Image (spheres, rainbow, N blue to C red):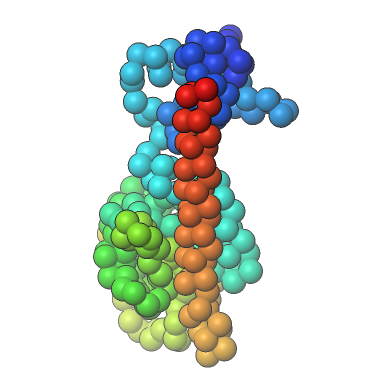
């Protein structure tokens, strides 16, 4: 059974104060679990830290984005808009889990080739995102709206809202596309056509309303990032002061 150390034990082991331990937890250098109101740290994680090994489960995106808060914002966006949401980094790699994914896209991603096609499509969509929200089209013919997330260090990622048709699609073109998708990704045509009936087609009112929402979600995410960075900066100042006492 895994042994867990307390914050006090880590203070004694590392010869640092409590604030420094929390700062290491916040910036991802340490991993811990919260039991009630107290943090506990797996002994294997502490040994990893002492050995200088990197935290393999943490990514650069985790350091850039406070994932839990961002996921909550994204989930709320999708709950209100009834549109799928996703945050990708500068390389177009998914940072969050897709909120309210549609069955059509889930069916395509059920195959390995389909999943890879979606990942590649996200990269292309991210590269096409400009300063203003823009309507984009994925490899499967579905539309997305995207908005950049930028701070003083430049572009950090892209918030995408999608899996809809901006306008009523041409049935003949759609049928040809569905056939091509089923052939490429080894799917059943009847199932894909059935799930395509659930893809929302936006009304003019919905288009107007949704056009503003990705940018609003991007601003909310950026605000959370700035708050987190400010908090870490304040923690660093406090830690420096306490270490000099």
The percent position of residue 69, horizontal first and vertical second, equals: 56, 50
Answer yes or no: is residue 195 visible: no
Q: Is residue 148 placed above or below 109 in the rendered structure?
A: below
- Extreme residue toward the right, this view: 36
Look at 59% across and 71% down and name the residue there: 81
Judged left or right of residue 87, residue 112 is left
Q: Which residue is rendered at x = 43% and y = 42% of the image?
A: 62
> Which residue is painted at 68% across and 25% down in the image?
38
Above/below status of 25 relative to 163: above
Q: Nearer the viewer, residue 34 or 117?
A: 34
Residue 221 at what x, y percent from top left?
Answer: 50, 59
Compared to 42, does 236 lie above or below? below
Quadrant housing the N terminus: top right
> Is residue 170 rendered to the left or right of residue 68?
left
- The residue sitting at 57% across, 58% down in the picture is 73
| 245 or 51: nearer the viewer | 245
Q: Residue furthest front?
A: 245
């Amino acid at each position: 059974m895994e042994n867990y150390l307390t914050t006090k034990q880590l203070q004694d082991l590392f010869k640092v104060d409590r604030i420094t331990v929390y700062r290491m937890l916040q910036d991802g250098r340490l991993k811990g679990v919260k039991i009630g109101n107290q943090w506990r740290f797996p002994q294997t994680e502490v040994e990893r830290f002492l050995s200088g090994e990197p935290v393999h489960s943490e990514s650069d995106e985790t350091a850039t984005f406070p994932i839990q808060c961002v996921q909550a914002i994204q989930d709320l966006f999708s709950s209100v808009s009834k549109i799928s949401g996703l945050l990708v980094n500068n390389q177009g790699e998914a940072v969050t889990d897709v909120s309210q994914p549609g069955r059509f896209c889930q069916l395509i991603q059920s195959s390995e080739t389909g999943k890879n096609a979606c990942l590649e499509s996200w990269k292309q969509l991210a590269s096409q995102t400009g300063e203003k929200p823009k309507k984009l089209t994925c490899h499967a013919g579905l539309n997305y709206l995207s908005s950049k997330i930028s701070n003083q260090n430049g572009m950090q990622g892209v918030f995408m809202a999608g899996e809809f048709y901006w306008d009523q699609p041409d049935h003949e073109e759609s049928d040809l596309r569905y056939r091509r998708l089923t052939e490429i990704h080894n799917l059943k045509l009847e199932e894909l056509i059935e799930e395509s009936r659930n893809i929302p087609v936006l009304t003019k009112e919905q288009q107007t309303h949704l056009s503003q929402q990705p940018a609003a979600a991007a601003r909310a995410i950026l605000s959370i990032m700035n708050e987190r960075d400010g908090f870490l900066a304040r923690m660093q100042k406090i830690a420096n002061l306490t270490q000099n006492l």
